[in-house]
Image (tube, rainbow, N blue to C red):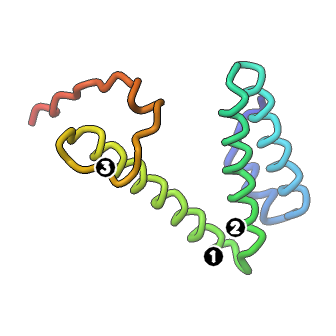
Amino acid sequence: METFDFDELAALAKNDPAAFEARRRQMIDGLFASIEARNDDPQFLQRLRGLQFRIDMERQRSRTSMRALLRIYSMMWDSFVEMNDLLQRVSSPNAPLAAPVPALVRNAKILPFKPAAE
């Protein structure tokens, strides 16, 4: 997998957007290849590719880079809220469940975290 040099990529994006896009795609493909080589769960890679597709579509739909950023940022928060909701439902056994808990969560071991000392 390639190394990530923010300054180099920022300069490339500013001076040669087409080359930046090619490099970005190459880095993403390299990441997927390294995950595929390490992981025996094809569904995991399929989900990652699906997420990348959604991100690419949001970038394509957006007229500006800032709009793309805001759309992707919103996607991230939607996912976070969904995960937090699931965690709250799983950790509160008496709370009614709005949807069935996935098997992955039912079989998960929940680790207790102690509050940090003040």
The residue at which mark 1 appears reads as 67
Q: In this orientation, which residue lies closer to the viewer: 83 or 72? A: 83
- 8, above or below 35, in the image: below
Give the residue type at disc 3.
Leu
The residue at which mark 2 appears reads as 58
Q: Earlier in the sequence, mark 2 or mark 3?
A: 2
Image quadrant in which the C terminus is located:
top left
Q: Are marks 2 and 3 in contact (CB under 8 Å)?
A: no
Residue drawn at (17%, 28%) of the image? 114
- 53, above or below 48, in the image: below
Find residue 116 and report its horizontal and vertical position in percent.
16, 32
Mark 2 or 3: the one toward you: 3
Q: Earlier in the sequence, mark 1 or mark 2?
A: 2
The residue at which mark 3 appears reads as 97
Image quadrant in which the N terminus is located:
top right
Query: How many numbered discs, if any?
Result: 3
As drawn, is 89 to the left or to the right of 55? left
Q: In this orientation, which residue lies closer to the viewer: 38 or 94? A: 94
Find residue 11 and report its horizontal and vertical position in percent.
77, 58
Q: Are marks 1 and 2 in contact (CB under 8 Å)?
A: no
